[in-house]
Image (tube, rainbow, N blue to C red):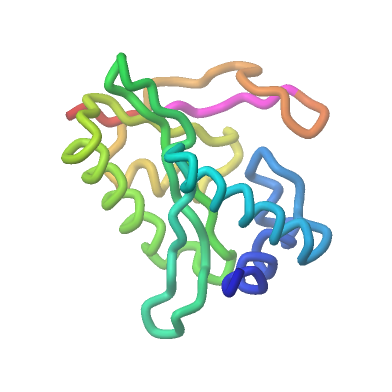
Amino acid sequence: MNDAEDMFAYASNSEVSRYVTWEAHRSLCDTKDFIRFILQNYEDKKIAPWGIEHKESGKLIGTIDFVSWQVDHHSAEIGYVLAPEYWGSGLMTEAAQKIIAFGFENMNLVRIQARCFVENMGSERVMQKAGMSIEGIIRKGMFVKGKHQDLKLYSIIE
């Protein structure tokens, strides 16, 4: 729970939540509930987010994880979120490259994909810089926050 305030700082930001499937955290209690959920997933040996720590400050500035993993198909999908003051810094690209390498080297994956809302140019740049290639647009691929969203689909193959 030591990182709850750091996480709340970005998770409560409407600019951040604009591009993700979850609503902005309204209180520190929301954030602590989410952290408890993450810790329970770790305890249950399920996939769960990894924290991204700013090297100089030691502050939690985001998370990255495998949001889904199809073991039988040797494929997974990554998702990520980053505090807005670090957007464009290359930090998420570095984290994405690391999780992709981890997936290929340790999880026996042959395919890793990521999706983003079509208007999320920052996330699209992360996928491109991490070595992913666009596969196309999934029209009305997700119903989020009361509307159908078109999604860009990127992947990388081992």
**Image point 38% across, 64% down: which residue?**
91
Residue 149 shown left or right of residue 45 in the figure: right
- Which residue sits furthest bottom? 57
Work out whether 46 lies above or below 73. below
Q: Main secondary structure of the magenta part?
A: strand
**Image point 46% across, 37% down: which residue?**
46
Quarter where residue 7 is shown: bottom right
Residue 25 shown left or right of residue 4 in the figure: right
Question: x and y percent of residue 3 in the render?
Answer: 58, 71
Work out whether 76 lies above or below 1. above
Residue 132 on the magenta segment: no
Residue 33 shown left or right of residue 127 in the figure: right
Residue 149 on the magenta segment: yes
Residue 10 shown left or right of residue 72 in the figure: right
Q: Nearer the viewer, residue 106 or 90?
A: 106
Quarter where residue 134 is shown: top left
Question: x and y percent of residue 152 in the render?
Answer: 50, 28
For the record, the magenta segment spans 148-153
Question: What is the quadrant of the N terminus in the image?
Answer: bottom right
**Image point 62% across, 56% down: which residue?**
35
Question: x and y percent of residue 79 in the render?
Answer: 48, 42
Question: What is the quadrant of the C terminus in the image?
Answer: top left
